[in-house]
Amino acid sequence: MLNFKQVITFAYDYEYENAYDLTKKKNFSAPKIYDANGDLSKRWYVYFSFRHPETGKLKRVTPYYGNANTFTTKEDRLQVLIQYRKVLLKILNQGYSPFEDNTEIHNKIINAKKVASSIPAQPITPEPKIVIPTTPIVETKNEPEIEPVEETIEEPKLKIDEAFNFAINFKKQIVSVTTFRSYKNRVDFFLNWIYNNRPEIKTIDDLTKKHLLDFLNDVLYKTSARNRNNYRTELSSIIQVLEDNEIITTNFVKKIPILKSTPNRNKTYSQKQQEAIFNHLRETDKVLLLYIKFIAFNFLRPLEVCRIKIKDINIENRTVQFKAKNSPLKTKIIPEILWNELPDLTQYKPDDYLFAGDIIGGPWETQLNNKRDFYSKRFKRNVKEKFNLGINYGLYSFRHTYITKLYRGLVKTSSPFEAKSKLMLITGHSTMSALEKYLRDIDAELPADYSELLKNKND
């Protein structure tokens, strides 16, 4: 007869899908995690109660450890136990019982596994295998009793900082360095607000929608609606990780509405302004001028320009590959007007950055945001202060300026749809609707003079 631990171990390696019968009375309590209040020197485990067939009452079952306690960080240990809990809940719903012979259901899993293994599949990274301990369980001070009891014992709640640290570390594995840093900064700011303004919140279960609303309102009053909305979006993404991993039951941030906000828009430069800036930089800062021309002529974003390495430029085809905002890798041609501005690229190492601070071509080991800020501050110092430009003018304005110029040039010889279709290939917008929204936002699409329609017939 298979014991219950053997069943769990096998089910963890291969989860057998089966429909749940929710009409029956539950014979078990939801599995919970004991984390010893975060003490890594003690054993953590998953525990639950099952209805005894003779008494009809719920009794505690021997807790399950697996190999969770071999992990040395709270986040890793918790992540393993979360997976154990999910698997345990699934097999309990499929009819497993610690008081019965589960061989028949176990054999069904074996047969299903054999069928699945005969079907070619893409290789995947296996989840950690549960290892059944062979040593007897030893009582530890302050641990819940492991002997069978008549009812379940409430699981110690996860501390709020530990829950958010788990979500942050989870995000770290799937997002870029820049995005991760943004998540972490906002979470740190939020937790600091909790400690200073809501010290009564100790665990993640204490956190409510009202607390998030209070925090977001505080951000709104001190900054802006746009910043408040940004906090809402990123905190919702973090809390969604907690819901997906069954640490909380629901992501209540989704129910908090987005506020209407009017962002500061980068204005386009006039022809006179653009020529004056280019002439000035031609004499004073050629590195910044070339950086701007990649934004203006190749329609790249400042961060995208900062990512370019020498090896990303195909000299033969005159193309450049880069990580774009909306795709992992994008290729664009380098137009002749920009290509003629480039130095001899063969003199540089392939891993050199095209823009490396004060020079063209070289190593530059710093964070991507620092690189963008370097050129933004340089532009402010060398251009904005020189020409007394307002807050609505920046590096991004050159992209708006030249997309506007290009669209108005195309629409002179073709229909608006044809012009937009050609423009999509050049700007890199993924959809026509996205391009049209962008053109509306920068006022690139203007009607012809409609004076004749306003005149009276007798005029």
Image (tube, rainbow, N blue to C red):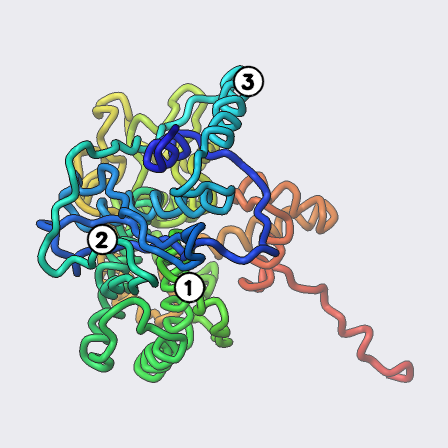
Element type where label 3 sits in the image: loop
What crowding class fits label 3: few (fewer than 14 Cα within 10 Å), some (14-19), or many (20 or more)? few
Mark 3 vs 1, N-terminal side: 3
What crowding class fits label 1: few (fewer than 14 Cα within 10 Å), some (14-19), or many (20 or more)? some
Amino acid, disc 3: Ile
- x then y, percent, for residue 403: 53, 51
Residue drawn at 53 percent across, 22 percent down: 111
What's the CA distance linking mark 3 and mark 2?
43 Å
Mark 3 vs 2, N-terminal side: 3
Q: Nearer the viewer, residue 6 or 379?
A: 6
Question: Is 389 located above or below residue 276 in the figure?
Answer: below
Q: From the viewer's perspective, tell me whether residue 34 is left or right of residue 51.
A: left
Residue assigned mark 3: 119
Which numbered dot is residue 233? 1
Q: Quadrant of the C terminus?
A: bottom right
Q: Nearer the viewer, residue 340 or 224?
A: 224
The image quadrant of residue 300 is top left
